């Protein structure tokens, strides 16, 4: 089980929960499981997200393990200048 | 379109070219003579990327017609180094990391050389005002001003 | 990524030196080739017809007269892309208007002709049947229920039902209970702020040369922050296979985020395809202002509570960013980053993304962050003033550390914010005496940084030099820092490495040069590629010596036998191994590809003193100090350069730069004369302190440094001006008329 922190405006899709738990080994599993358990998250996940795993931020990195991570945070897709 | 025949000297070399009556000296340098070291940042005299000297005077080549070069001596960035010997101000720009992207650099070097040809004792304020017609968006000017001041110091043997 | 402290404390030989950049000579002699410096035989010149209206339906475009003009070889409109593109590609519709012109300057058609003069003439012969519509350019106006609507269907599910249609996204971040936090405060201040749109202001206008062959293959030369992204976008818009389009990045004359997307490149390709000849397309400066991607303008409410002794109890911000005619303003980054420097129990930030009749915004150095920091840091400053507290002490008291929960939900790893605050505190500028009409301002700033897709190759040349290929345009000297890291890892002198920027046919996909990612991610890949080559060189040495591979180690640029059973062999240098490479198995190369992660966040503190002329409202910057955490400065000269350049862009934004739209929705200052960026005589030297708190995610501890430096200046200068004039300023830029108005008001 991974506990995933959800940012504020997505919490309408999780019934207000700030954190949800899903069964997942990797970021990809996790995103799929999130979209399945909380269909309201699916459009945002499709548009693109980043995921922070124990402080390191990943973009499009499906295979990164999340199992056993202390902190997993869903973030908007990061970009820069 | 009738073309105008112009005879001029560029970086010391006798040069002839044909240009349209509406073409600027910058157009001529870049598009007809292949001297693309002189840059166009605005085309309206506001950025200094196109700086050249005409008979030793600093001008924006985007504000001067090609036809007006008749009989004058033009100096461009391509003439600042003598062969493969860099001018001291070029060396100092490298030593001081006075460029990031480098698009403004030819204009700054031509302008700085024009200043140093007039005086080797510019104050920081003089350098800043002399270069105020040259825009640089990358460096914040700090290292450019230092490079020019340091060149002046070296040239006057300080 | 392995966190390896062994590297952080190593004794660097090349990294950290102020080396001369490899492209230096080309750039001081005029030899370097930028976007507009390329030509091709038989090349045509292209020009773009742009909408004079802020908002208009396009009922028809008649190009027949233009096409009939002698010397015109092709005319394109949106119809020339229509067959190929995906249904709603905002980038394409931004490059060429579809059924509506959405802003003043929006491209509606383009011409390729034998000369600039003919192309210009042809533009005048194109007849566009416009039906002018009401427009809106202001963010707050655009959010009103009766505002003219740009798109019927651009709003997504994050926006509550019933919200006006120009509001297209909503974001919320934070934790804790802000109302409870405000209740604990001794003082709560709430203010509303506005910032106007600024432009990146790169001195090189967008330029490209496209050559589309009759075999369906094309070459594109352009100034861009990312040739691979250009290829992906253009291939999509033109219905091409990626491998059929080779994109070469020219030298780039500044980007700052503005060259992370496409504007003219697909248009030049479409013209070249139609004309069957190479086409050069260069924007004029006015087009750069009207039709590239400036940053968002914003309207922000910010409320912060503080105890008498300077503890922040809660912070709340509501941010409204207009990002031009399409969704995608960087408001989420504003909402995530504004409070990021502080360790807060209660924090909430809500962001609204709004569309208006302005050009589609593009990234600008730490996109979205400077405006949010402006609001937050201004309110903190005012609280300190009201409570009689030292603004630096208060920031030190509240600042984030390793283990702090950030407002965007991530717990920070090792960061260096407090170190930057302390560096400011111990700098002489902090105690320099101030005179009349002078004021001092301080502010902090934060940026995420990221890693991303990176692919690097290096070849050990037969004479012992090294050719390094990377896929990211070098905007500010990165070839030097890549060569340094490569030389460091291989143990050879810096001048033995030559770094080139590969075109898209030579390496795998590299993300654009943005997010301050290059020194971090490409550096990391370069180090790994060097390690790959080292492994192979050790293998060659082992084979020559007839000992096992693992009995060879690499030290100081040489393979050496190691361990008890390795035997006695004199070390073989890289050059010696390279010299016999042909006899030992052929050429030696190193390679690495990754989607890099572990880019450490970066913090800065800025300190500025200003003097106001009360007559004219003119602000003179007297002193400016940047203290920023670079993790490890690979080339300190260029790290300082990033600090200084970002700070000065921020100074320009806070004092002068703004997009001014008239009642007619047209941009009124589309040139460097009226959109005034700082010049040398406006500024003092920009003092810098490089703080080095190593990033645990990089072998040498490197953090991105390119963006954070533009985050604090808006607030720092506003705080300084507010102290100098004794009035709290709440709008950026603080141009002289606004300061005079504040003084009189
Ligand atoms: S191009 Fe001549 S001044 Fe800008
Ligand atoms: S170095 Fe880029 S504009 Fe000056």
Image (spheres, coloured by chain):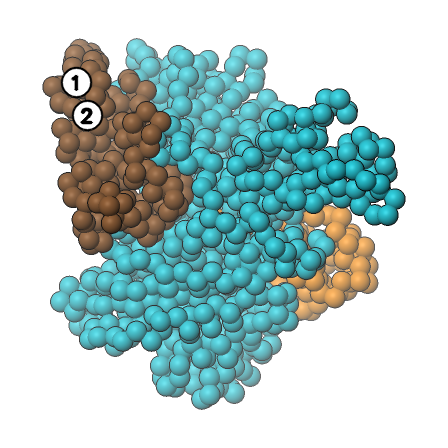
Chain colours: A orange, B brown, C cyan
Q: Residue C25 sits in which quadrant? A: top left
Let me know if residue A62 appears in the view.
yes
The CA distance from mark 1 to mark 2 is 8 Å
**The N terminus of chain B: image quadrant:** top left
Name the one closer to the observer, C504 or C461. C461
Chain for mark 2?
B
Residue A70, given in percent of the width and then of the height, sits at: 74, 66
For the point 77% across and 24% down, the residue is C585
Residue C419, given in percent of the width and then of the height, sits at: 51, 69
Q: What numbered label is drawn on residue C14? A: none
Circle 2 sits on which residue?
A: B74
Q: Is mark 2 within 8 Å of ligand 1?
A: no
Q: Is residue B144 left or right of residue C296?
A: left
For the point 63% across and 43% down, the residue is C491
For the point 17% across and 67% down, the residue is C613
Instruction: Label 2, secondary structure: give it.
Output: strand
Instruction: Label 1, secondary structure: give it.
Output: strand
Q: In the image, are marks 1 and 2 on the same chain?
A: yes
Residue C205, given in percent of the width and then of the height, sits at: 36, 36
Q: Is residue C177 above or below residue C248?
A: below
Name the one closer to the observer, C73 or C494. C494
Let me know if residue C135 appears in the view.
no
Chain for mark 1?
B
Residue C716, given in percent of the width and then of the height, sits at: 36, 67
Q: Is mark 1 within 8 Å of ligand 1?
A: no
Name the one closer to the observer, C469 or C408. C469
Q: Is residue C539 above or below residue C714?
A: above
Q: Is residue A11 left or right of residue C384?
A: right
For the point 43% across and 54% down, the residue is C640
Q: What numbered label is drawn on residue B8? A: 1
CB under 8 Å between discs 1 and 2:
yes
């Amino acid at each position: 089980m991974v506990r995933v922190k959800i940012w504020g405006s997505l919490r309408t899709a999780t019934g207000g929960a700030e954190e949800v738990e899903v069964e997942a080994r990797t970021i990809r599993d996790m995103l799929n499981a999130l979209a399945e358990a909380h269909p309201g998250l699916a459009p945002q996940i499709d548009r693109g997200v980043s995921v922070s795993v124990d402080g390191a931020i990943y973009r499009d990195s499906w295979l990164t393990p999340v199992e056993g991570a202390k902190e997993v945070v869903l973030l908007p897709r990061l970009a820069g200048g | 379109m009738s073309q105008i025949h112009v005879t001029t000297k560029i970086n010391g070399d006798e040069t002839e070219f044909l240009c349209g009556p509406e073409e600027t000296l910058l157009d001529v340098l870049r598009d007809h003579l292949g001297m693309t070291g002189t840059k166009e940042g605005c085309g309206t005299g506001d950025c200094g990327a196109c700086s050249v000297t005409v008979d030793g005077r600093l001008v924006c080549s985007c504000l001067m017609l090609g036809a007006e070069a008749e009989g004058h001596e033009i100096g461009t960035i391509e003439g600042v180094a003598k062969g493969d010997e860099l001018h001291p101000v070029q060396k100092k720009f490298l030593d001081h990391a006075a460029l990031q992207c480098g698009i403004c650099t030819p204009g700054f070097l031509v302008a700085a050389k024009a200043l140093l040809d007039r005086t080797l004792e510019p104050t920081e304020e003089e350098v800043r005002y002399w270069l105020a017609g040259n825009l640089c968006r990358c460096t914040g000017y700090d290292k450019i001003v230092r490079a020019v001041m340091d060149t002046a110091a070296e040239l006057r043997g300080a | 990524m392995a966190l390896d402290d062994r590297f952080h404390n190593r004794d660097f030989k090349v990294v950290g030196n102020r080396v001369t950049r490899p492209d230096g000579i080309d750039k001081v002699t005029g030899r370097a080739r930028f976007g507009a410096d390329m030509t091709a035989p038989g090349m045509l010149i292209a020009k773009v017809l742009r909408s004079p209206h802020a908002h208009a339906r396009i009922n028809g475009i008649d190009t027949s007269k233009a096409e009939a003009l002698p010397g015109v070889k092709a005319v394109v409109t949106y119809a020339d892309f229509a067959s190929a593109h995906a249904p709603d590609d905002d980038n394409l519709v931004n490059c060429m208007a579809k059924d509506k012109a959405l802003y003043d300057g929006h491209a509606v058609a383009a011409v390729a002709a034998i000369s600039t003069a003919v192309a210009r003439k042809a533009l005048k012969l194109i007849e566009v049947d416009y039906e002018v519509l009401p427009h809106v350019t202001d963010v707050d106006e655009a959010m009103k229920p009766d505002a003219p609507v740009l798109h019927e269907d651009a709003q997504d599910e994050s926006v509550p039902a019933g919200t006006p249609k120009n509001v297209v996204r909503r974001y919320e971040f934070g934790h804790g209970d802000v109302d409870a936090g405000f209740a604990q405060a001794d003082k709560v201040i709430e203010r509303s702020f506005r910032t106007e749109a600024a432009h990146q202001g790169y001195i090189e206008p967008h330029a490209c040369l496209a050559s589309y062959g009759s075999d369906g293959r094309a070459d594109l030369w352009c100034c861009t922050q990312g040739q691979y992204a250009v290829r992906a976008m253009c291939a999509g818009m033109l219905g091409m296979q990626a491998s059929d389009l080779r994109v070469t990045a020219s030298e780039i004359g500044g980007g700052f985020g503005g060259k992370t997307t496409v504007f003219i490149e697909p248009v030049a390709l479409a013209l070249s395809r139609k004309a069957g000849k190479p086409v050069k397309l260069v924007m004029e400066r006015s087009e750069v202002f009207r039709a590239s991607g400036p940053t968002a303008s914003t309207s922000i409410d910010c409320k912060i509570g503080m105890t008498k002794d300077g503890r922040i109890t809660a912070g709340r911000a509501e941010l409204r960013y207009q990002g031009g005619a399409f969704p995608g303003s960087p408001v989420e980054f504003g909402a995530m980053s504004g409070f990021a420097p502080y360790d807060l129990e209660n924090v909430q930030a809500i962001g609204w993304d709004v569309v208006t009749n302005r050009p589609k915004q593009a990234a600008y150095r730490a996109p979205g962050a400077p405006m949010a920091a402006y609001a937050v840091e201004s309110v903190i400053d005012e609280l300190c003033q009201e409570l009689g507290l030292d603004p630096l002490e208060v920031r030190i008291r509240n600042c984030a550390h390793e283990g702090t929960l950030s407002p965007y939900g991530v717990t920070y790893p090792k960061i260096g914010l407090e170190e930057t605050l302390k560096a400011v505190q111990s700098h002489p500028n902090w105690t320099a005496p101030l005179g009349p009409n002078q004021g001092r301002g301080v502010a902090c700033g934060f940026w995420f940084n990221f890693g991303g897709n990176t692919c690097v190759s290096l070849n050990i040349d037969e004479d012992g030099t090294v050719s390094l290929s990377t896929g990211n345009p070098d905007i500010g000297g990165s070839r030097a820092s890549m060569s340094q890291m490569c030389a460091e890892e291989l143990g050879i002198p810096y001048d033995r490495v030559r770094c080139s920027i590969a075109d898209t046919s030579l390496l795998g996909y590299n993300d654009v040069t943005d997010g301050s990612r290059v020194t971090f991610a490409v550096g990391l890949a370069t180090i790994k590629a060097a390690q790959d080559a080292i492994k192979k060189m050790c293998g060659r040495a082992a084979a020559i010596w007839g000992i096992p591979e693992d009995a060879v180690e690499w030290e100081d640029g040489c393979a050496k036998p190691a361990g008890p059973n390795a035997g006695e062999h004199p070390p073989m240098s890289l050059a010696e191994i390279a010299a016999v490479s042909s006899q030992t198995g052929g050429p030696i190369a190193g390679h690495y590809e990754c989607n890099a992660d572990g880019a450490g966040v970066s913090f800065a503190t800025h300190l500025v003193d200003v003097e106001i002329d009360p007559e004219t409202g003119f602000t003179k910057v007297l002193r400016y100090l940047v203290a920023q955490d670079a993790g490890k400065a690979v080339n300190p000269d260029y790290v300082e350069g990033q600090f200084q350049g970002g700070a000065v862009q921020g100074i320009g934004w806070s004092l002068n730069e703004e997009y001014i739209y008239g009642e007619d929705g047209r941009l009124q200052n589309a040139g460097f004369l009226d959109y005034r960026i700082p010049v040398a005589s406006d500024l003092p030297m920009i003092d810098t302190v490089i703080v080095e708190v190593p990033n645990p995610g990089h072998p040498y501890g490197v953090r991105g440094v390119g963006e954070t430096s533009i985050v604090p200046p808006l607030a720092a200068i506003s705080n300084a001006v507010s102290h100098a004039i004794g009035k709290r300023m709440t709008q950026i830029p603080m141009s002289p008329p606004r300061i005079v108005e504040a003084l009189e008001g």
